[in-house]
Structures are given as C-alpha cells and as structure tokens.
C-alpha cells in the first residue's frame, strides 16, 4: 500500500524529534520495515536522519562540548588515580609511573586538538539545526497555512545544508 508523502514526513519528524525508529514507525502508522526502508532511502539520497539528530542534540545541549568534557574528565580522573597510587605504593617504579602520567596527559592533549579540528563543522551544523527549528516553530505559530509548503522544501533544503557541512 502506498503511503501519502505526509506519512513519510510524519515518520521523519517523529524520528528527528527523538523517538527510536520503532516508536516513530508506530506514531506514523507504518510498519517497522517500511520505516527502516524509508530511512535508508533518505540516507541514499543524502538525507542523513541520524546526522540531523546528532546536530539537534548538540544545538539543544552542547552535545559535542559535553562529550569532550567527559573525555577530559575521564583522563583527569585517571591521572589523579594514578598519582594517588604512586603516592601510596613505594614499590612503583617512578620512571614507569611518569611514563603512564605522560601517556594520559598526551591523550588529553590529542583529544583537545581533535575537538578543535572537528568543532567548526560541528558548530555550523548545530547552528543550522537551531535556525531550522526556530523557523519551523515560527511558521507553525504565525503562518500555519504554510506548514505543508515548509515541510515540502525542508527535506531538499536539509540535503543542501548537509552537503555544505561536508
């Protein structure tokens, strides 16, 4: 049975809104296999739903920065634990302990450098998602008669935004 375009949009909206594909398919009223096929078809056409979800999480909650903060925190906690172990155990070879601390701090420096290289593209995508969400809310609130037209152009526009992000 062929589904109307609105059903596909409803599935996409539910998934981008945070529902797992299983729940999004139920909400949109389509079989799970159909939902997965539509998602795969969209990806093949350049519309990566998962990329949009990740960008939305970053726009909403500082996802990438928060993740990098957790990485930094983990390395720092390991450094502290190692330093406590060194202080408590006189049998630990100080040269090996210094190498271990150096390795952990090197990992932190590398993670920091990687975040700097990755951040520009991630930040642009997060800002794009924030603007698109704001525009969608604005149209829904003030110009509801144009919601269908917005939904129609959003999908190809999303592919443009993603292709610009690399």
Image (cartoon, grey):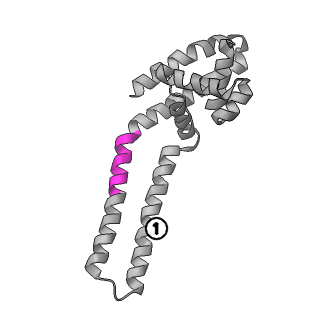
- Circle 1 residue: 77
Q: Which residue in the rendered view is the most extreme toward the bottom?
A: 90
Considering depth in this image, is 60 or 9 the residue closer to the camera?
9
Considering depth in this image, is 77 or 145 the residue closer to the camera?
77
The quarter holding residue 33 reads top right
Part of the protein shown in magenta: 109-119
> Vertically, is 152 above or below 79?
above
- Check disc 1 and report its element: helix, strand or loop: helix
Q: Is residue 163 left or right of residue 56?
A: left
Q: Position of residue 120 (x, y in %)?
A: 39, 37
Q: Is residue 103 left or right of residue 6?
A: left
Q: Position of residue 133 (x, y in %)?
A: 60, 27
Q: Position of residue 164 (x, y in %)?
A: 40, 23
In this orientation, does residue 46 appear? Answer: no
For image coordinates 66% across by 29% down, the residue present is: 32
For image coordinates 48% across by 47% down, the residue present is: 65
In this orientation, does residue 86 appear? Answer: yes
Quarter of the picture holding the N terminus: top right
Q: Position of residue 140 (x, y in %)?
A: 70, 20
- Dot 1: within a 10 Å radius of its alpha carbon, few (fewer than 14), some, or many (20 or more) residues? few
> Vertically, is 33 above or below 63?
above
């Amino acid at each position: 049975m062929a589904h109307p375009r609105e059903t596909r949009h409803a599935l996409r909206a539910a998934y981008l809104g945070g529902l797992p594909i299983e729940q999004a398919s139920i909400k949109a009223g389509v079989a799970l296999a159909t939902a997965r096929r539509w998602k795969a078809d969209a990806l093949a056409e350049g519309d990566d739903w998962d990329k949009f979800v990740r960008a939305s999480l970053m726009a909403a909650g500082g996802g990438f920065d928060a993740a990098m903060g957790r990485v930094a925190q983990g390395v720092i906690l390991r450094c502290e634990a190692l330093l406590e172990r060194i202080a408590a155990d006189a049998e630990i070879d100080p040269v090996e302990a210094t190498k271990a601390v150096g390795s952990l701090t090197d990992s932190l420096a590398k993670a920091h450098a990687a975040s700097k290289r990755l951040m520009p593209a991630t930040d642009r995508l997060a800002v794009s998602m924030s603007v698109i969400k704001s525009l969608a809310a604005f149209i829904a609130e003030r110009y509801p008669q144009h919601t269908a037209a917005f939904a129609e152009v959003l999908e190809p526009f999303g592919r443009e935004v993603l292709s610009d992000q690399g």
